[in-house]
Amino acid sequence: MIARPFKEGLAAVVGCVVHGLGVSVAPWNAVKEAPGEVVSVPFGNPQIHRHVGLLQRQTSPRTTVIDRLHHHLASFSGEFGIPG
């Protein structure tokens, strides 16, 4: 048997599902990159969404770029980041 490196994080979770070891609730980035034999079943009515935040160092030479990214991301959502 050939030794294979261990998968970590979401790749390990997806690998377990692919090999028939169960099911998982996983973020979309894990689902969209999963192989064809894995199916995604959205749940919740209304559909459940994950809330995320933008983190940055208190002092950063990239403040202007980060502010632009924040503005762009915020333009896709309503008050408190909840789509309107």
Image (tube, rainbow, N blue to C red):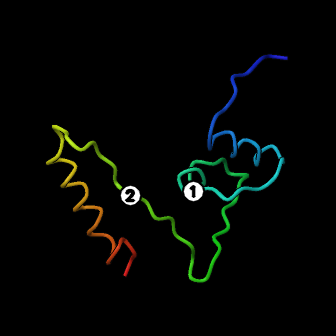
- The three-letter code of the residue at mark 2 reads Gly
Q: Residue furthest front?
A: 58
Percent coordinates x, y for residue 40 in the rendering: 66, 62
**Nearer to us in this view, 19 or 6:** 6
- Residue at x 77% of width, y 56% of height: 23
Percent coordinates x, y for residue 76 in the rendering: 31, 70
- Residue at x 56% of width, y 73% of height: 48
Q: Secondary structure at mark 2?
A: loop
Would you say 79 lies left or right of 71 here?
A: right
* Quarter occupied by the N terminus: top right
Percent coordinates x, y for residue 7 in the rendering: 67, 32
Q: Secondary structure at mark 1?
A: loop
Q: Which residue is mark 1?
A: 27
**Nearer to us in this view, 23 or 53:** 53
Q: Which residue is mark 2?
A: 53
Q: How many marks?
A: 2
